Amino acid sequence: MTQADDTLWSAIGDPTRRRMLDLLLAEGGGTATSLGRQLPVTRQAVAKHLGVLGRAGLVRSATSGREKRYQVDDEQLARAVAQLASVGSAWDARLQRIKRIAETIQRTQQEHLRQDEQHD
């Protein structure tokens, strides 16, 4: 994983930032003030979270009057979704292997128990 990937994963790892992305997507954008009204954090905290999302490339901003207006960068969000799907697939494959190993161990233990019972 690259530094950019780490930054991206760190940015979307926070529930407040994921909620911000949801709000920005639903509303087609927003300001720190408008987001602050909908979140249980201060406007300063919203601004910090937006900074993290901006450094990860997930949001971009444009000045609108005295405030910055933020929008989700669709291309970077699509990249994040693709990475998440890829990681999910890899973990599904790992879990399937673990399940097969566990089932093999369980069958082996059951066979040994049956053999022990037959010898008694």
Image: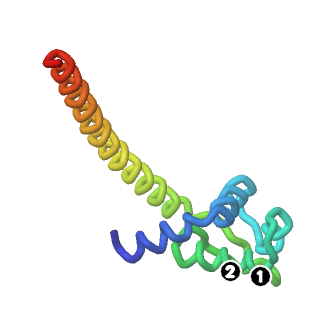
Residue in the picture at 16% in, 21% down = 115
Q: Where is residue 21 shown, x and y percent of the image?
A: 65, 61
The residue closer to the viewer here, 49 or 71, is 49
87 or 47, which is in the foreground?
87
Residue 89 at what x, y percent from top left? 36, 45
Residue at the image point whose x is 21% and y is 19% from the top = 117
Query: Secondary structure beneath disc 1?
Result: helix
- What numbered label is drawn on residue 48? 2
Residue type for callout 1? Gln
Depicted 81 relative to depicted 72: above or below:
above
Q: Image quadrant of residue 102?
A: top left
| Residue depicted at x 31% and y 37% | 99
Outermost residue on the right side: it is 37
Residue 69 found in image quarter: bottom right
Question: Is the N terminus in the top left, top right, bottom left or bottom right quadrant?
Answer: bottom left
Q: Position of residue 90 (x, y in %)?
A: 33, 49
Q: Are marks 1 and 2 in contact (CB under 8 Å)?
A: yes
Which residue is farthest top? 118
Determine crowd level at label 2: few under 14, some 14-19, many 20+ residues with C-alpha closer than 10 A.
some
Q: CA distance from mark 1 to mark 2?
A: 6 Å
Near mark 1 (Cα within 10 A), the count class, few <14, some 14-19 or many ≥20, is few
Amino acid type at mark 2: Lys
With 7 as the anchor, is 118 left or right in this view?
left
Q: Which of these two is toward me, 57 or 61?
A: 57
Colour scheme employed for the rendering of this structure: rainbow
Label tally:
2
Q: Which mark is residue 44?
A: 1
